[in-house]
Structures are given as C-alpha cells and as structure tokens.
C-alpha cells in the first residue's frame, strides 16, 4: 500500500522501562505548536494508556486538554490488552466518526514500563476491524541515560524493548555525563543496529522523530533501504557451508548477562531465492523459535518476481503481510535479512534459511 492511498490511522507504540520518561515525552508530543494554537487546530492525537495495577495513575499526569484519552486499566499489558485494546480502539473510532470526540489523525499507545509490546502488535495485526482502519507506524522506546545501563543489566524486558524498537529516545541526557551516554549509545547500537538514537531532554523531541516512521509498511525503495540498515549489522553469511540445522537445539548456550543473550546479524544471499523456501524457513522459525526471534526485517530477491524485491517484517512469531517494491533501491540486488534474536544463534538461522532455499531449488518440478 502506498502513502498516497493509505487513509488508515497510524498508531505509534511508545514503550520503555519504568520511569524512563515515556509520559514526559508524551506530554511534549501533545503540546500544540504555535501555529496550531493560532489556527485553533483540534487535538490531532488520541492517547491510549495501559497501566500496571488496577488503578491507573499515569493518565492523570498527561495533559489531557491536548489530546483524546482512553485508559486501559488493570492488569499487565501482556495478559490483558488483547481483550481490551480492540473495544478501546472501536470506541475512539466511533466517537470520532460521530463527532463526539475531535477528529484525531493518529494514536499513541503508551505501554506499561514492564510490558512486552508483542501482544499489542499482535492485536493490531490480527484484528481485521483494527487493521482495516489503522496501521502500526512504529515502535518508539525510551531509554534512561542515567539508569539505562543498570536496567539493561538486570531486566531482560528492558533489552527486549530496545531490540523491538524502530526508534530509540535516549532520555534524561541532561543528567548523565558524556562518557555514560557514549557507552550506553554503543550498547544500544549493538543490541539494535537498525534503530536511530535520538537524544531527549525533559521530553523535548521533534515529532518527526516519532511519527510517520512507516516502519512496517515501507513501500518506497530508497526509504526501504535506509529502514533495513543492513550495513549496520554484522554480516555472518554470504554463501554458507551447509550444516543441517537441528530444530531441537536451536542455540548454543550463551553467557554474558542480558546482552550476551542477544544477537544482531545480517544474512546475505547473492542468488535469487525461491519463495517457497523462504516462506517455509520463516514459518519454521516462527513456529519453533518465536520467543527467540525479537525482530526480523528483510528485502528479498525472489526467483519468481525478478526486479520486484519483497520486503518482510517479523516481531517474534508475528509476520506482517509482505510488501512488494516497484524496484530495487540501487544496484545491490542481494537478498538481505537482518535479525535480532535472543538465545538463538546466527548459525542456526543461517543454516535454516540456506537449507530450505536449497532444498526447494533442488525439488524437481512437478510438471503441473
Ligand atoms: N532531568 C530530567 N528528568 C526527566 C527527564 N525525562 C523525564 N524526567 C523525569 O523522570 C521521572 C519519570 O518520568 P516519566 O515520564 O513519568 O517516566 P515513565 O516512563 O512514564 O514512567 P512509568 O510510567 O512509571 O514507567 C519524572 O519525574 C520526570 O519528570 C529528562 O529528560 N530530564
């Protein structure tokens, strides 16, 4: 789907560890600009907040005069949100349609600080009603410049939130010294080489760093290449000596704290790949290794579609509908897959893809 025809409402998922500055960023994003105030532009953003515990408090801290607010209260986002997010989105949408609430143009969902955002992504993808009227624009994760290192050491959830981000907001940079910031940035770039890092003080962030990311629906070839950021990843295979992958033992034991469990790497294939092999390999990964597959993006040179690269996305077991680009961004027409995994090593993934794509190549044509 292209920007010109996509009239669905974009949803931004704002996540980040406890106290890392999500609400402060949100308040700043909701502030109308000088021109919006002058022209009395109605609030453009609807906010959905999810809070841990039965009584929500955070919504009382958000300046509600500038946005339309809905609160998903009670329970951890992981277990509760799938049930309540769809009705909440429906209520907002119907209120907007019936003129009961301002005609918002985008939605921000702020998660709890300890949430795995995957169930929210799953809801946005799996509900037909939601997917017809909305799309996920991107996942934005706040990281505390002062406490971020310690949180990443101690809480794997914080690592997962960083790995799943399309954009990282490094908050409280006014409180941290330059060496701490530099060290944390290097660590974030290792955990998630594709996500640009933006420094934020007191929540002040340019909305362009948060909105219109189109991270899951990139259909412009040049932007798709930037979005893939494959050059930032460690390349682990071009053409591999094939070892048979074992589904029962997909990872070697990993050490080195929370970071040591994370791998970020890129696989490149010089020759066009058969679509059946690619999809079987990815189905297998999704089925057997879903929790270990934190993020995957790919641009694939498919044998059956010469000249028309296919763009793929996954977050854990969630595979987004593939997008066909009208052309390659440049002369480099190799297939590139970038992966961020947890407790899943690169040899396993690379052997799986190689094995399935070679097997399909060698399968005799059925002659139908
Ligand atoms: N000095 C400074 N303080 C900040 C900054 N960003 C946030 N804070 C403060 O940090 C505290 C936590 O910020 P919040 O925005 O509430 O963080 P949060 O991620 O929404 O917190 P939870 O909802 O509890 O997970 C607040 O006291 C903020 O005022 C910043 O850039 N600089």
Image (tube, helix red, strand yellow):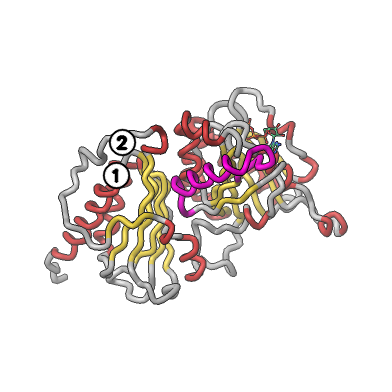
Q: Which residues are magenta?
A: 170-194
Instruction: Give the mark nearest the N terminus, 2 or 1.
Output: 2
Pinpoint residue 314: horizontal percent, then vertical percent: 41, 51
Rendered residue at 39%/32% (across/down): 257
Pinpoint residue 352: horizontal percent, then vertical percent: 23, 52
* Residue 83 in sight: no
**Residue bearing the label numbered 1:** 345
**Ligand 1 found in image quarter:** top right
Rendered residue at 65%/57% (across/down): 208
Quarter of the image for residue 234 reads bottom left
* Quarter of the C terminus within the rendering: bottom left
For mark 2, give the secondary structure: loop
- C-alpha gap between disc 2 and disc 1: 9 Å
105, above or below 250, in the image: below
Q: For this view, does 74 lie left or right of residue 36?
A: left
**As rendered, which of 74 and 99 lies closer to the eye?**
74
What residue occupies the far top of the structure in this picture?
A: 54
Q: How crowded is the residue under tag 2: few (<14 C-alpha within 10 Å), some, or many (20+)? A: some
Residue 185 falls inside the magenta stretch: yes
Mark 2 and mark 1 residues within 8 Å of each other at the beta carbon: yes
**Residue bearing the label numbered 2:** 254
* Residue 183 in sight: yes
Rendered residue at 43%/75% (across/down): 330
220, above or below 343, in the image: below
**As rendered, which of 290 and 102 lies closer to the eye?**
290
Pinpoint residue 270: horizontal percent, then vertical percent: 28, 68
Rendered residue at 70%/39% (across/down): 24
For mark 1, give the secondary structure: loop
Observer-side mark, 2 or 1, equals: 2
């Amino acid at each position: 789907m292209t920007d010109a025809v996509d009239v669905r409402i974009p949803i931004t998922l704002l996540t980040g560890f406890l106290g890392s500055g999500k609400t402060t960023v949100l308040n700043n994003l909701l502030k109308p600009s000088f021109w919006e105030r002058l022209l009395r532009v109605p609030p453009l953003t609807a906010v959905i907040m999810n809070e841990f515990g039965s009584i929500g408090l955070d919504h009382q801290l958000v300046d509600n005069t500038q946005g339309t607010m809905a609160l998903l209260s009670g329970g951890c986002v992981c277990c509760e949100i799938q049930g309540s997010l769809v009705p909440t989105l429906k209520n907002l949408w119907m209120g907007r349609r019936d003129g009961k609430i301002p005609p918002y143009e985008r939605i921000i969902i702020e998660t709890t600080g300890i949430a795995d955002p995957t169930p929210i992504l799953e809801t946005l993808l799996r509900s037909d009603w939601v997917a017809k009227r909305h799309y996920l624009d991107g996942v934005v994760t706040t990281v505390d410049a002062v406490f971020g290192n310690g949180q990443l050491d101690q809480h794997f959830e914080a690592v997962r939130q960083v790995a799943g981000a399309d954009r990282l907001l490094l908050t409280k940079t006014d409180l941290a010294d330059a060496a701490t910031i530099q060290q944390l940035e290097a660590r974030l770039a290792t955990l998630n080489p594709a996500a640009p890092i933006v420094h934020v003080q007191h929540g002040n962030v340019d909305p362009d760093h948060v909105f219109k990311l189109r991270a899951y629906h990139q259909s412009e070839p040049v932007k798709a290449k930037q979005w893939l950021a494959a050059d930032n990843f460690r390349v682990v295979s071009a053409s591999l000596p094939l070892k048979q992958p074992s589904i029962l033992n997909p990872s070697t034991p990993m050490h080195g704290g929370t970071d040591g469990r994370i791998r970020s790497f890129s696989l490149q294939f010089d020759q066009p790949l058969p679509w059946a092999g690619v999809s079987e390999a990815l189905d297998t990964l999704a089925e057997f290794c879903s929790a270990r597959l934190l993020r995957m993006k790919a641009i694939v040179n498919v044998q059956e579609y010469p000249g028309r690269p296919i763009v793929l996305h996954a977050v854990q077991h969630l595979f987004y509908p593939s997008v066909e680009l009208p052309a390659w961004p440049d002369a480099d027409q190799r297939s590139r897959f970038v992966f961020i995994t947890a407790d899943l090593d690169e040899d396993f993934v690379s052997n799986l893809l190689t094995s399935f794509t070679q097997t399909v190549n060698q399968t005799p044509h059925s002659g139908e």
